[in-house]
Image (cartoon, grey):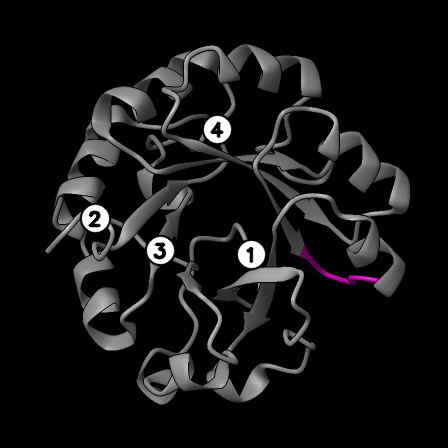
């Protein structure tokens, strides 16, 4: 498998420069930074900027937003990110104002739950997550095996409850372009990432 064909890895919920450095050393492709005050993984722009210094040049920086306003979008576009990942409501004017590729997050319990519009040319990929994003639980994989065919030909990011033990199975079922993990590579008390789990996850993806 060539580098362009392999499944890529996004580690989301990075909170410290130390964690960002681990992504560079272990070979992740994307680093996700959450800007949502209700999340325990919420980060400030100042801390994210410090994290950026530890990322290798090949790692894409993803800003994760929930129902962003025009102000939110414009601020992100000026902060050195490569991609904007949007959960919740996405207004037309917000999508139009985005100057970066947008990953549209879809939260489902099964593939019958895709109800948002993903057809816009500005949507660069579709991220499919469980109903409660960030909760570390999968959606119904058994009833969603045909999910990729419902994504309008967009690149497919598989998220929701992935961990080193199930990611290989998720790839076999869904054939995603990218796998996205957060809680599945955190330490036991959920206060930060676990380097060994990150390494194990990336190895299971088949690098």
User: Which numbered disc, 3 or 1, marks the residue that appears first in the sequence?
Assistant: 1
Give the image location of residue 53, x and y in percent.
48, 10
Residue depth check, mark 3 versus mark 4: number of the one nearer the observer = 3
Q: Residue at x 49, y 70 (%)?
A: 154
Mark drawn on residue 12: none
Label 4, residues with CA under 10 Å away: few <14, some 14-19, many ≥20: many
Within the magenta stretch, is there residue 118? no
Q: Residue at x 22, y 57 (%)?
A: 5
Mark drawn on residue 14: 4
Do residues under tags 2 and 1 come within 8 Å of each other at their CB atoms?
Answer: no
* Start-end of magenta stretch: 87-91
With 55 as the anchor, is 204 left or right in this view?
Answer: left
User: Which numbered disc, 3 or 2, marks the residue that appears first in the sequence?
Assistant: 2
Label 1, residues with CA under 10 Å away: few <14, some 14-19, many ≥20: many
Q: Which residue is mark 3?
A: 178
- As helix, strand or loop, the secondary structure at mark 2 comes to loop
- As helix, strand or loop, the secondary structure at mark 1 comes to loop
User: Which numbered disc, 3 or 4, marks the residue that appears first in the sequence?
Assistant: 4
Give the image location of residue 97, x and y in percent.
83, 49
Magenta stretch: dominant secondary structure: loop
Mark drawn on residue 164: 2
Give the image location of residue 46, x and y in percent.
68, 13
Quarter of image, res 41:
top right
Vertical arrangement, residue 56 with respect to residue 4, above or below: above
With 166 as the anchor, is 63 left or right in this view?
Answer: right
Within the magenta stretch, is there residue 88? yes
Instruction: Kindly report the distance in space between the C-alpha atoms of the residues bearing marks 3 and 2.
Output: 15 Å
- As helix, strand or loop, the secondary structure at mark 4 comes to loop
Instruction: Kindly report the distance in space between the C-alpha atoms of the residues bearing marks 3 and 1.
Output: 17 Å
Q: Residue at x 12, y 50 (%)?
A: 206
User: Which numbered disc, 2 or 1, marks the residue that appears first in the sequence?
Assistant: 1
């Amino acid at each position: 498998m060539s580098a362009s064909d392999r499944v890529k890895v996004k580690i989301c919920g990075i909170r410290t420069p130390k964690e960002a450095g681990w992504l560079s050393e272990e070979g992740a492709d994307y680093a996700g930074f959450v800007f949502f005050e209700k999340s325990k993984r919420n980060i400030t722009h100042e801390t994210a900027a410090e994290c950026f210094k530890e990322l290798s040049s090949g790692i894409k920086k993803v800003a994760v937003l929930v129902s962003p306003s025009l102000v939110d979008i414009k601020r992100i576009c000026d902060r050195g990110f490569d991609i904007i990942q949007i959960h919740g409501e996405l207004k037309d004017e917000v999508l139009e104002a985005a100057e970066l590729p947008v990953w549209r997050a879809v939260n489902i319990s099964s593939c019958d739950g895709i109800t948002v519009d993903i057809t816009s040319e500005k949507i660069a990929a579709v991220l499919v997550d469980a109903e409660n994003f960030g909760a570390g639980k999968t959606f119904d994989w058994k009833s969603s095996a045909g999910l990729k065919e419902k994504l309008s030909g967009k690149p497919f990011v598989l998220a929701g409850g992935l961990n080193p033990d199930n990611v290989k199975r998720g790839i076999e079922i869904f054939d995603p372009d990218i796998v996205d993990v957060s809680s599945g590579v955190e330490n036991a008390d959920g206060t930060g990432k676990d380097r060994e789990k990150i390494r194990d996850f990336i190895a299971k993806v088949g690098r």
